[in-house]
Image (spheres, rainbow, N blue to C red):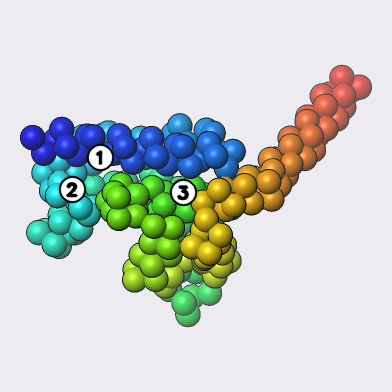
């Protein structure tokens, strides 16, 4: 049954991404990753076009000229570069990629690793995510800063391996993201306290 095989595949993928996200310290993103795949519009098309060795989105696109599942998915998941496509403020450039927050670039990296592992199974090796990226069209749509960051992670994975890359991201990227978030929280708390103080004084 194709629907059951598709369900097994997306479950395996989600658990693999969760494992990667947990390894780098992005726990909430690991839990919430790709939940829209269980919605009817995405799951029904995924089951119908399931093949097992590649994304059903490709098969649906080849059959219909577009993929309804992907159009639904990319607008609800911020780790996809397509979520960040918009019109440039420079009217001569048209539609371009906006810079992605670092935590979503990291989730995208985890997602790409997991997809390669699921589809390639025992043939997977640490250079595959980089090879797949180079064969694809992502680099043309990514914001230059987001592109450089993703390529940095993929090249690090290919050259130094998964354990080293996860430790680097957790210790040097995610900790910095959390520190920045904490500083913003402190600043916002100060503003609220000052606002309340002024109200009381009046």
Contact (Cβ within 8 Å) of mark 2 with mark 1: yes
Contact (Cβ within 8 Å) of mark 1 with mark 3: no
**Mark number for residue 52?**
2
At 18% from the left and 48% from the top, the residue drawn is: 52
Q: Which residue matches tag 3?
A: 110
Compared with residue 67, is residue 27 higher up or lower down, i.e. above or below? above
Q: Position of residue 122 (x, y in %)?
A: 30, 50
Left of 61 or right of it: where is 84? right
Compared with residue 4, is residue 48 higher up or lower down, i.e. above or below? below
Left of 201 or right of it: where is 105? left
| Dot placed on the residue nearer the N-terminal end, 2 or 1 | 1
178 vs 183, nearest the viewer: 178
Q: Position of residue 152 (x, y in %)?
A: 56, 64
| Residue 168 visible | yes
At 39% from the left and 57% from the top, the residue drawn is: 125
Q: Distance between the residues labelled 1 and 3?
A: 16 Å
| Dot placed on the residue nearer the N-terminal end, 2 or 3 | 2
**Mark number for residue 9?**
1
Residue that lies at the very extreme toward the right in this rendered image: 201
Left of 167 or right of it: where is 79? left
Q: Position of residue 162 (x, y in %)?
A: 51, 51
Q: Distance between the residues labelled 2 and 1?
A: 8 Å
């Amino acid at each position: 049954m194709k629907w059951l095989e598709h369900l097994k595949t997306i479950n395996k993928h989600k658990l693999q991404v969760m494992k990667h996200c947990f390894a780098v310290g992005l726990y909430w993103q690991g839990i919430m990753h790709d939940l829209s795949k269980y919605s009817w519009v995405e799951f029904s098309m995924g089951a119908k076009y399931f093949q097992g060795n590649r994304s059903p989105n490709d098969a649906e696109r080849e059959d219909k000229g577009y993929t309804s599942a992907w159009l639904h998915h990319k607008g609800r998941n911020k780790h996809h570069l397509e979520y960040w496509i918009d019109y440039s403020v420079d009217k001569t450039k048209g539609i371009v990629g906006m810079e992605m927050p670092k935590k979503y670039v990291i989730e995208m990296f985890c997602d790409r690793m997991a997809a390669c592992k699921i589809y390639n199974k025992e043939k997977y090796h640490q250079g595959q995510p980089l090879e797949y990226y180079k064969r694809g069209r992502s680099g043309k749509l990514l914001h230059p800063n987001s592109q450089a960051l993703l390529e940095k992670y993929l090249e690090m994975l290919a050259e130094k391996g998964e354990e080293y890359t996860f430790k680097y991201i957790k210790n040097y990227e995610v900790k910095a993201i959390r520190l920045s978030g904490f500083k913003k929280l402190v600043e916002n708390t100060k503003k609220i306290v000052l606002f309340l103080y002024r109200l009381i004084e009046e």
